[in-house]
Amino acid sequence: MALMKNTLIALFAMALCLPLSAQDKPKPDAAKSNLEWQKEEMCQFVFFAVLEGLYRDGVQNEIVDAIIGDKIEKKENKVKTHFVFRCKLCHATYEAFRTYRNRPAFMQTKGASTFGKGADLALLKQLGSKDARTRIYSMGALVRPWIMHRIKETRKTPEEKTAMKKRFEKYAQEGADLLRTHKRAKDGFYLDWKFYGSCQACEAAKDLGKAGF
Ligand SMILES: [Zn+2]
């Protein structure tokens, strides 16, 4: 009986250790499992903020293509030019860019499909930079004000703002952990992401503090 109990304890301990030892190795199946971002309120908030910003500014397709990794062949690598792979807020941002890119033209408007005058095309050079910091921060300069815009527009109460900031910080922490794992797995896309912070959608959490939150 004691032996059986010990065996059970040993098995239980092994089961506990397994996830730890498996963490360092890239899991081939992890990339294929579903990423459930779309049901989460904060992800939807970011999605709409970005989609709205893209329409309001009338961002050109060239810029969108540079951000969604249009020229990258491998599907799962597309997201990695500007975002942290499998980070939920990053993914919500990425999907907003994709959705906007697939927008239909408005009827009877001679092909118009968006509202604003467009962004400065000089951005293209920065978005395509080999330097990760330049590339990611130029995307962030677009996205972060859009998130702040939606926060103002939706007139959150001070309590809601505090709750929101906390939730943003939780995503940012998850994003930072994922980034660390990607780097450890020697993912070529992330080896040079050495700069402060993680991803730009998550970094928006830090803007909240600056904007009177
Ligand atoms: Zn992220």
Image (cartoon, rainbow, N blue to C red):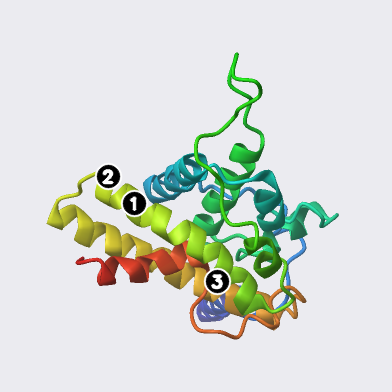
Q: Which residue is mark 2?
A: 153
Mark 1 vs mark 3, CA separation in Å: 18 Å
Residue at 74% in and 76% down:
130
Amino acid type assigned to the residue bearing label 3 in the image: Tyr
Instruction: Bin the neighbour count of mark 1 within 10 Å (Cα to Cα): few under 14, some 14-19, many 20 and up.
Output: some
Residue 20 falls in image quadrant? bottom right
Task: For marks 2 and 3, give the CA distance.
Answer: 24 Å
Compare residues 28 and 199 and report the one nearer the observer.
199
Of label 2 and label 3, which has the lower sequence position?
Answer: 3
Which residue: 77% across, 51% down?
Answer: 70
Secondary structure under the numbered disc 3 in the rendered image: helix
In the rendering, at what x and y percent does residue 186 appear?
Answer: 75, 80
Quick one: 208 or 169, which is closer to the camera? 208
Rendered position, 112 above or below 2: above
Q: Is mark 2 within 8 Å of ligand 1?
A: no
The residue tagged 3 is: 137
Q: Residue furthest right?
A: 73
Q: Tell me if I can see residue 34 in this picture.
A: yes
Q: Position of residue 138 (x, y in %)?
A: 57, 67
The residue that mark 1 highlights is 149
Pointers 1 and 2 in contact (CB under 8 A)? Answer: yes
Q: Name the residue at 48% across, 48% down.
A: 50
Residue at left offset 49%, top offset 65%: 141
Give left or right: position of 177 versus 79. Answer: left
Report the amino acid beneath label 1: His
| Residue nearest the observer in this picture, 84 or 35 | 84
- Whole-percent x, y for residue 7 in the image: 58, 78
Q: Secondary structure at mark 1?
A: helix
